Image (cartoon, grey):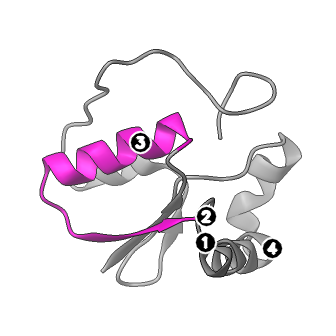
Amino acid sequence: MLKIYGSEMCPDCIECKYNLDRNNIEYENIDITKSLKGLKEFLKLRDKDEIFDEAKENGYIGIPALVTDEGKLTLDWEGFFIQQGIEVVHPGETGAACGIDGKGC
């Protein structure tokens, strides 16, 4: 099953989950801001996988992070949907971001 590491406080995570629900895609949601176990699991991924290097360099958390059934990790949730042939919808797009610089999560 697809795993999503994110937070209810993250606009990108909210949009990602909206698109998953809209397309009836099953997933395990791991809210890193509600569970220390989930946070530790996420940090273990983030600390060892180079896919997070750019996020860390720019001061982002690196969420939403998707882990596929095959164990493939991606931070490009929109690209994930596009590869699946699924249209990405941005409901009530406000341009909100959770980064200190006003960009990304």
Identify the mark at residue 32; answer none if there is no mark.
2
- Which corner quadrant of the image does residue 43 belong to? bottom right
Question: Is residue 20 inside the magenta stretch?
Answer: yes
Q: Are marks 1 and 4 in contact (CB under 8 Å)?
A: no
Task: Give coordinates of residue 72: x percent, y percent.
Answer: 48, 75
Please tell me whether mark 2 sits on a helix, a strand or a loop.
loop
| Residue 57 visible within the image | yes
Where is mark 1, residue-wise?
35
- Residue 93: horizontal and vertical position, in percent? 38, 18
Q: Are marks 4 and 2 in contact (CB under 8 Å)?
A: no
Q: Name the kind of residue labelled 2 in the image.
A: Ile
**At numbered mark 1, what does the secondary structure look like: helix, strand or loop?**
loop
User: Residue drawn 68% across and 75% down?
Assistant: 36
CA distance for labels 3 and 4:
24 Å
The numbered mark, 1 or 3, whose residue comes first in the sequence reads 3
Please report the residue visible at 53 percent of the width from the left and 53 percent of the height from the top.
Answer: 64
Q: Which residue is mark 3?
A: 14
- Front: mark 3 or 4: 3
Q: Which residues are magenta?
A: 9-32
Q: What residue is pinned by disc 4?
A: 47
